[in-house]
Image: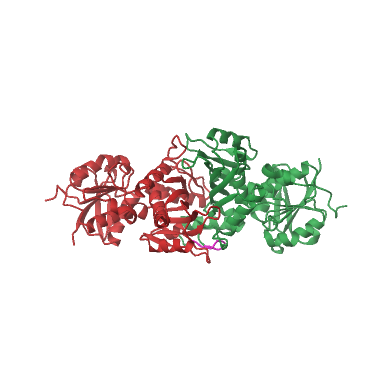
Chain colours: A green, B red
């Protein structure tokens, strides 16, 4: 079996660390791993399988002889280093929003639109975490007819804002337990015991950046440029799994609940959690650490015969980021689409 | 000024205690207060203004010479004691769901439908907390045209499940901070660091009891029997304020954002919190302890010219329960609709 030399840019971040766990858990054939981060983290040791691997400062040379570069270091770093890594022959799989909407660049959720991938593609942005979880919950329903409109509200965990945001929720949870004042550093408002509209700038239409990403990216990945998506993104005091309350409107009559359940059960990457009797539906504590997106609370909308409602939870760091990225690498590997990098001997 | 002899059934509960604070804060003319609860709480002392008032076990005699009985002790207690209190001449204002949908019984949010109250009315159920906050956010928009449909998702605090649920969140917050296993007692699932579909039984249509209450009660109070309301009710780890993400569809074109802002600003009981520049919108920590319902994140829905989206937060224990009840009493008092009880000398 072919082995791959991989690099992780942003190795010390919340998503970066998930890559190391996933390589081991999913037995991705890694022959060498290069952990890259900013100068500040250089020298730090991270565990990979049973080894301690030192983090090195990112540089052009760091991408020599790399087959696959996983990026999770934000848009600015992606814009700086992706061209270099690509030029050196690596496939780049980037979790930032830098290239997602670029024309000719595929925005892939492997279960949904792998067919758009061409052998010439070398740069694979990974979509916004909330968009991916929304798409996973919506895509299995497309077999029942054209989807006309989606109205969704999110319950987003703090991990989407990175490892420091996760530490902030943990610190504030203790402050709350101790009846001390909460100290916001990463977020503009206290998050423990609170929730707030996603703290990204609001555009002229009244949508924040997160909502706008979800709308644009979902349209791109689902190949439905005109799909009407109304979403309100809200940050909640949950550590790592995002939830979504979703109302889907079809052009024609909505499918029966039984048929929807079957469609979800048959769809790769989805786990149906829809037990009305025991009032058991998707919850973040179940979704955390879980590769599948949980879907449930499936019902026909009593107010509109063309609509259904569902509730979904997915691990933001896994399917919302590192797992989706690794799935792209796995698919490329399976189809032998990862060429030898130019700089390798 | 006329003074009133009041009783609080469920005085030791989360809502019960809010009544005592509100009487003082809103200077409701109380000449005597009788604190009623189950046998178990009898003898307990509760603070009212600067006095310690003993709690007594509820009995028929306890409603003698009571002008206004505020109930917050659940549906079973309401069904048992309301007929007795009414018979003794008290006005009964009940926070349970026991009588809300009874024909001939008004379901009043004073700012919205006080006009339905007749001098003969003596029993006033207070609506479901989520329904009240939803209605407060929707009612000011009715001046812009007939509302055809509402799609909402809730972010409900634990206070709706009572004082023990609030203690459970506080206990689990400490357990979470200490990395200990979370111990659910009141809720079926951990609530700290988690969220879940409202834990009430699911009906044949796939809606839980909470959602069904919101749908039916909103239709009744807004006097729109056919209003289409799709809602998903979710419990979140927040102590006492409920939030709602709401999409409102009009029969015709939606109003401009500026006009909606003005309508909210002019509506009693609403506080507009809609600062796009500083990304400041309604949050539970702001709404907690606040009498007004906060409304913001107001935008025209880019997917449908007839729709708008808004976000609302309201204190579940205040506008969602005790405050709405006291406002009913205040209005009745102002209109001299509180007769001398039969049992008084």
A76 vs B267, nearest the viewer: B267
Query: How many numbered discs?
Result: 0
The residue most toward the right is A345
Is residue B111 visible in this depiction of the protein? yes
* Residue A53 magenta-highlighted: no
Q: Nearer the viewer, residue B155 or B230?
A: B230
Q: Quadrant of the N terminus of chain B?
A: bottom left
Is residue A191 among the parts visible in the rendering? no
Residue lying farthest to the bottom in this orientation: B277
Residue B43: % across, % down: 25, 48
Magenta range is A182-188
Direction from residue B300 to residue B341 in the image, left or right: left
Q: Residue at x 67, y 56 (%)?
A: A96
The residue nearer to you, when weighing B113 against B281, is B113
Q: Residue lying farthest front?
A: B252
Tell me which secondary structure the magenta stretch mostly adopts. Answer: loop
Image position of A320 (left or right of B67) = right
Whole-percent x and y of residue A131?
Answer: 61, 50
Residue A58 % position (x, y)? 75, 61
């Amino acid at each position: 079996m072919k082995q791959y030399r991989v690099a992780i840019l942003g190795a010390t971040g919340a998503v970066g660390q998930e890559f190391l766990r996933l390589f081991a858990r999913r037995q991705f054939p890694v022959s060498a791993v290069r952990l890259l981060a900013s100068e500040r983290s250089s020298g730090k040791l991270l565990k990979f399988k049973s080894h301690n691997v030192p983090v090195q400062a990112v540089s052009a040379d760091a991408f020599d002889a790399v087959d696959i570069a996983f990026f999770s270091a934000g848009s600015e770093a992606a814009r700086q280093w992706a061209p270099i890594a690509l030029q050196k022959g690596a496939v780049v799989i980037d979790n930032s929003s830098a290239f997602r909407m670029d024309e000719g660049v595929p925005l892939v959720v492997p279960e949904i639109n792998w067919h758009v991938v061409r052998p010439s593609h070398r740069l694979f942005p990974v979509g916004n975490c909330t968009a991916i979880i929304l798409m996973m919950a919506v895509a299995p329903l497309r077999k029942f007819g054209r989807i006309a409109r989606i109205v969704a509200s999110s319950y987003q965990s703090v991990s989407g804002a990175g490892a420091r945001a996760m530490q902030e929720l943990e610190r504030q949870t203790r402050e709350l337990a101790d009846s001390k004042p909460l100290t916001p550093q990463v977020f503009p408002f206290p998050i423990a015991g609170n929730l707030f509209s996603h703290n990204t700038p609001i555009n002229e239409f009244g949508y924040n950046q997160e909502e706008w990403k979800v709308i644009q990216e979902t349209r791109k990945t689902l190949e439905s440029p005109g799909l009407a998506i109304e979403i309100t993104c809200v940050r909640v005091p949950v550590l790592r799994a995002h939830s979504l309350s979703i109302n889907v409107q079809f052009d024609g009559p909505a499918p029966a609940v039984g048929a929807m359940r079957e469609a979800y059960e048959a769809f790769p990457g989805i786990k149906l959690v829809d037990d009305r009797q025991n009032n058991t539906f998707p919850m973040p504590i179940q979704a955390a650490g879980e590769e599948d997106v949980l879907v449930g609370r499936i019902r026909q909308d009593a107010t509109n015969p063309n609509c259904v409602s569902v509730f979904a939870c997915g691990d933001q760091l896994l399917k919302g980021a590192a797992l989706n990225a690794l799935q792209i690498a796995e698919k490329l590997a399976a189809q032998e689409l990862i060429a030898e990098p130019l700089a390798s001997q």
